[in-house]
Image (tube, grey):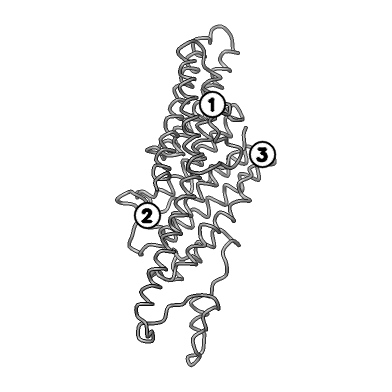
Amino acid sequence: MKRTGLRHLPVIASLLLSPLFACGGAQKQDASGPNSPSAAAQIVGESAPPRPSQQDTNQSSPGASPPAPPQGLDVPQSKQADPFPSQARIQSKRAANVDEGFQRIERAGNDCTEACKALKSMDHACGELCAAATGADERSLCTRSTDRVRRARDTVKRVCGSCPGGTSVEPSDPVPSR
Amino acid sequence: MKARKGHLLGFVFALLAVAGCDRKSADVHCGDTGNAVVIDGPILAYLSQARALHHEASLHESAGKIDAALASLGRLVAAPKPHAGMPVPEVEEVLADAYARMAELELSQSALDRAAANVDLGLAHASGDTYFRGHLFEIRGLIEEARSRALADGGVGNKDAAEAARKRALVALEEAIGIQERVIKNALSDGGAP
């Protein structure tokens, strides 16, 4: 009964948390607060990249120039410095679109994870129900339940493509799938 | 008993909720409960503690020490809850999942009454159509099936009781199928939309 899920947790958590680092700059969150990405990273361990602490930031010399933005990143200029205000708006809109895209991906992944778990449970419950069924009425219940599983598989297959862990999404496969 | 990782996914969902909250303004509450609590330090600490205890239970379980695994999970469900008296969906999911895992472990030991009691305790933390509630009904079905078999093996006098347990198993399994069907429908309701 070895549990195999732990090895996936850092990867999944990293995927979930990575948008925070990508888009967190738009939020008014205290980086040292409990809801900050660094606090969440403490839960998931090594999966989160290191971030400079507030203390580190404050320790820079007062006269030091601000750090140059990483190469390859589009960093919007301030309104005063930007000779093309419309560009700033475009950048802002792009950032919002990217943020929305991340949320959509997160939501879709989350929904399919939930659906696959539910399908696995449904598949197993149906297998047990059919194994325990005796008599015409209970066999009919088994048939109806099997049809429900097959329809659910079809739905999950259409939206999610497949499920991890050997849970079948092929409506024509036997129920239970294993 | 089949390997299960529902509790781990529960933590993933909890972390996702944390991520979702992080992306909102600080005064936005998470979850759809009107009086829900914002994900904060105590909740994160509780989730971290829960993860550690699940991991500890997994190590014991891998070593065949089911009682020790149950003890780890027992510490989890007995641990102080953040924001006691306030609805915290992530904490409720952790508890529902922990009780489900305890019930499965007890089922593997044929401790059917204890397993059934933990299913009941788990259901108290899993309202509405959620994976956790469906999974708890699935386990209840397995427990009643096992009870039916045990009673049937016990002699002619237990025949009626065995049949009653078998009927209860069918009811629970059908309930599990219905809940999970709705979970899938709700999760993917807008998935096919253009």
* Whether labels 3 and 1 share one chain: yes
What amino acid is at disc 1?
Answer: Leu
In the rendered image, the vertical position of residue A65 relative to residue A71, given as above or below: below
In the rendered image, the vertical position of residue A116 relative to residue A173, given as above or below: below
* Tags 3 and 2 touching, CB below 8 Å: no
Residue B25, how many percent across, how many down?
Answer: 35, 64
Q: Which mark is in front, 3 or 1?
A: 1
Could you tell me how far apart the alpha carbons at marks 3 and 1 are, in whole angstroms? 22 Å
What amino acid is at disc 2?
Answer: Cys
Q: Splitting the image into 4 quarters, where does residue B112 fall? A: top right
Chain bearing mark 2 = B
Q: How many marks?
A: 3
Badge 3 crowding class, 10 Å Cα cut-off, few under 14, some 14 to 19, many 20 or more, is few
Chain bearing mark 1 = B
In the rendered image, the vertical position of residue A143 relative to residue B46, given as above or below: above
* Pointer 1 or 2: first along the chain: 2
Residues A92 and A132: in front is A92
Residues A133 and B35: in front is A133
Secondary structure category for the residue under label 1: helix
Numbered label attached to residue B142: 1
Instruction: Determine which residue is flagged by label 2.
Output: B30
Could you tell me how far apart the alpha carbons at marks 3 and 2 are, in whole angstroms? 37 Å
Instruction: Determine which residue is flagged by label 3.
Output: B65
Badge 2 crowding class, 10 Å Cα cut-off, few under 14, some 14 to 19, many 20 or more, is many
Residue lying furthest right? B63
